[in-house]
């Protein structure tokens, strides 16, 4: 925040109520945590970007988050799934980007497969998270999802709405890519 200076505020004032970028972590004061949570949940919030740790997690429901950026290593695939699952809780499109700097040892193969860009990220994660006794119907449906034809111009097929691998693999090469 210090290096952003006045760029972190609207209306050229250092008043906290004009801060466009805020932080949320375990070491900020309770009043600042509460203010940040309350302000960020408003649809007309001044806060447009929230930089946070895992402290911004369980029990917090903000439906209209459109972008989640995850920076650095994650403790496990399940933690990663929980963290980027903060976006799009209202059913509208959201994106998640991961700038990985490491990986959890237990999930090494899954993370390598995700980073190889040779398969659907969503399918890879769901396969890794499913237990042997889990019903595999949803995974089978995911493998047979609807793909558009090369002639469309503005596609909304299941591939164009999935992950970066699927969007690149879709034959239409439309504006969603």
Image (cartoon, rainbow, N blue to C red):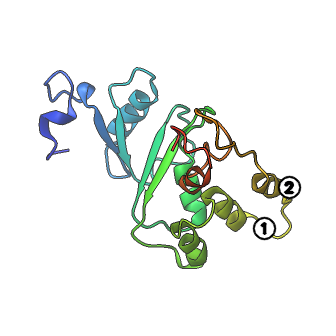
Q: In this view, does 79 lie above or below 112?
A: above
- Residue at 69% x, 43% y: name it: 149
- Looking at the rendered structure, the secondary structure element under dot 2 is helix
Q: Is residue 45 left or right of residue 131?
A: left
How much space separates mark 2 and mark 1, taking CA atoms? 13 Å
Q: Is residue 81 above or below residue 114?
A: above
- Residue at 53% x, 70% y: name it: 116
Mark 2 or mark 1: which comes first in sequence?
1
Q: Say which of marks 2 and 1 sits in front.
A: 2
Residue 113: x and y in percent read 58, 71
Quadrant location of the N terminus in the rendered image: top left
Query: Counting other residues with Cα less than 10 Å from the Cα at mark 2, is it few (<14), some (14-19), or many (20 or more)?
Result: few
User: On residue 131, which mark appears?
Assistant: 1
Residue 66: x and y in percent read 49, 37
In this rendered view, identify the residue nearer to me: 16 or 116: 116
- Looking at the rendered structure, the secondary structure element under dot 1 is loop
User: On residue 137, which mark appears?
Assistant: 2
Q: Is residue 24 left or right of residue 120?
A: left
């Amino acid at each position: 925040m210090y290096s952003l200076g006045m760029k972190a505020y609207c209306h050229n004032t250092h008043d906290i109520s004009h801060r466009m970028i805020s932080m949320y972590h375990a070491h900020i004061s309770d009043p600042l945590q509460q203010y940040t949570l309350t302000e960020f949940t408003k649809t007309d919030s001044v806060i447009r970007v929230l930089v946070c740790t895992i402290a911004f997690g369980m029990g917090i429901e903000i439906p209209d988050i459109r972008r989640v950026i995850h920076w650095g290593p994650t403790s496990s695939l399940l933690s990663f799934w929980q963290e980027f699952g903060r976006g799009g809780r209202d059913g509208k499109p959201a994106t998640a980007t991961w700038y990985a700097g490491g990986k959890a040892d237990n999930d090494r193969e899954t993370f390598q497969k995700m980073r190889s860009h040779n398969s659907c990220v969503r399918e890879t994660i769901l396969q890794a998270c499913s237990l042997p006794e889990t019903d595999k119907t949803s995974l089978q449906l995911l493998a047979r999802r609807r793909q558009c034809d090369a002639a469309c111009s503005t596609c909304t097929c299941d591939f164009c709405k999935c992950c970066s691998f699927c969007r690149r693999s879709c034959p239409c090469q439309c504006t969603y890519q």
